Amino acid sequence: MLAIARQEAQAAGLTYAGGVLPEDAWKLFIGGQAHLIDVRTAEERKFVGHVPNTLHIAWQTGPALIKNPRFLRELENKLPKDAVILFLCRSGKRSAAAATTATSAGFIRVFNVREGFEGDLDERQQRGAVSGWRQRGLPWVQD
């Protein structure tokens, strides 16, 4: 599945290794084939929920949601540059930005979890009903 993700990424002109669907990310994570890193804020993880036993490195921090200046340093301290890394955020946008940045810093097997934790907006401009980790019934917990 990662080889297919790489091919699709190359065809789309992505700078990182590719995107995977939530079910595939779960299979890779529980199979020990990849590390799952949640890049949402600590508040999102606490109040919206998160995937159990995942790493957390916020892509943005503070009330103004500025880019976390320690993001790469924290990533480098947790994982080697050749690790298979799956980034997860709310909808897949921040995690794609994190994947681009990590790849630029020399991480070579970085993937975005498409749809994110809460999924795409529905016709009422709300998340959680159309797609995403939770909507697909994958494991998650809430503090």
Image (cartoon, rainbow, N blue to C red):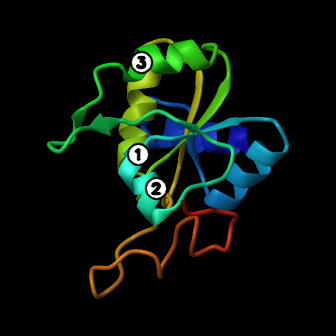
Distance (Cα) linking label 3 and label 1: 17 Å
- In the visual, does 54 lie left or right of 92? right
List x then y, in percent, for residue 49: 52, 61
List x then y, in percent, for residue 96: 41, 41
**x 49%, y 57%: residue:** 116
**x 70%, y 64%: residue:** 139
Residue type beneath disc 1: Ala
Asked whether the residues under the numbered discs 1 and 2 touch, taking CB atoms below 8 Å apart as contact, a structural biologist would say: yes
Residue tagged by mark 3?
Answer: 72
**Residue 45 visible to an observer of this rendering:** yes
- Kind of element beneath mark 1: helix
Residue tagged by mark 1?
Answer: 42
List x then y, in percent, for residue 97: 36, 37
Residue tagged by mark 2?
Answer: 46
List x then y, in percent, for residue 37: 56, 38
Residue type beneath disc 2: Lys
Q: From the viewer's side, name the closer residue of 33 and 140.
A: 140
